[in-house]
Image: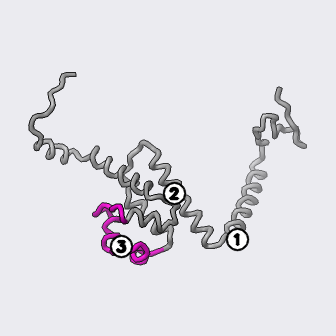
Amino acid sequence: MKSKRETKKGRNTVQANGSFVSPKLSEVERLKINQEFSEIRRRSESNKSDEERLYAKILQLKFQIEDYIKSDKLDEQMTFGYFLKQYIDVSGRKNNEFADDIDVNPTELSQIVNEHRDPNSRSIMRLEAHSNGIILAFYWHCIYSKDKALELITNDQLRIEEGKHVKRRLVLSL
């Protein structure tokens, strides 16, 4: 049996099983509550240090990366270069400054960001170190792997060209 507690207006708000039932609010009440909540959030945000803001942004990016890695979806927009650009932007650095931070030639960094060059293990490990271990090298490698998987799936021209080099294919009857 679920016991219920009544509010002053006679609306059910808490059930014994721990779930919360929101009371029906008028449009005016809802707007007032939203404004109050927004003000509380604004005050809370203004009290954060720059370091706390940066940490929150890095975590947000990490969660986006994790979501993409865990999904089965391969997205042409969610590339290594895209996430690296997001990381550089979140860190508040310019490309040249960031290249200096991780001891990579600025041209090499630009080529990786713009997807004209593949990242190597060295640069991936430096990205982990730069984030102080928040975004693991494994995550960066998984993004790169998804880029390569998408390339293999969609590159029909390469499939045709490389197929020409195969002599005695397996003969299978299914």
When the figure is inspected, residue 68 is found, relative to residue 45, above or below; the finding is: above
Q: Is residue 22 magenta?
A: no
- Helix, strand or loop status at disc 3: loop
Q: Are marks 2 and 3 in contact (CB under 8 Å)?
A: no
Residue 51: x, y in percent?
60, 71
In the picture, the quarter occupied by the C terminus is top left
When the figure is inspected, residue 103 is found, relative to residue 151, above or below; the finding is: below
- Helix, strand or loop status at disc 1: loop
Label 2 vs 3, first from the N-terminus: 2
Residue under label 2: 62
Q: CA distance from mark 2 to mark 3?
A: 22 Å
Left or right, 61 with respect to 18, comes to left
Residue 75: x, y in percent?
38, 49
Residue at 38% across, 46% down? 74
In the picture, the quarter occupied by the N terminus is top right
Outermost residue toward the left? 167
Mark 3 residue type: Val
- Which of the two discs, 2 and 3, sits closer to the camera? 3
Residue 47 marker: 1
Residue at 75% across, 51% down? 30
Q: Crowdedness of circle 2 by 10 Å Cα count: few (<14), some, many (20+)? A: some
The residues colored magenta run 93-122
Residue at 31% across, 73% down? 107
- Helix, strand or loop status at disc 2: helix
Residue under label 3: 104
- Which of the two discs, 2 and 1, sits closer to the camera? 2
- Dividing the picture into quarters, in which one does residue 45 lie? bottom right
Q: CA distance from mark 2 to mark 1?
A: 23 Å
Mark 2 residue type: Lys
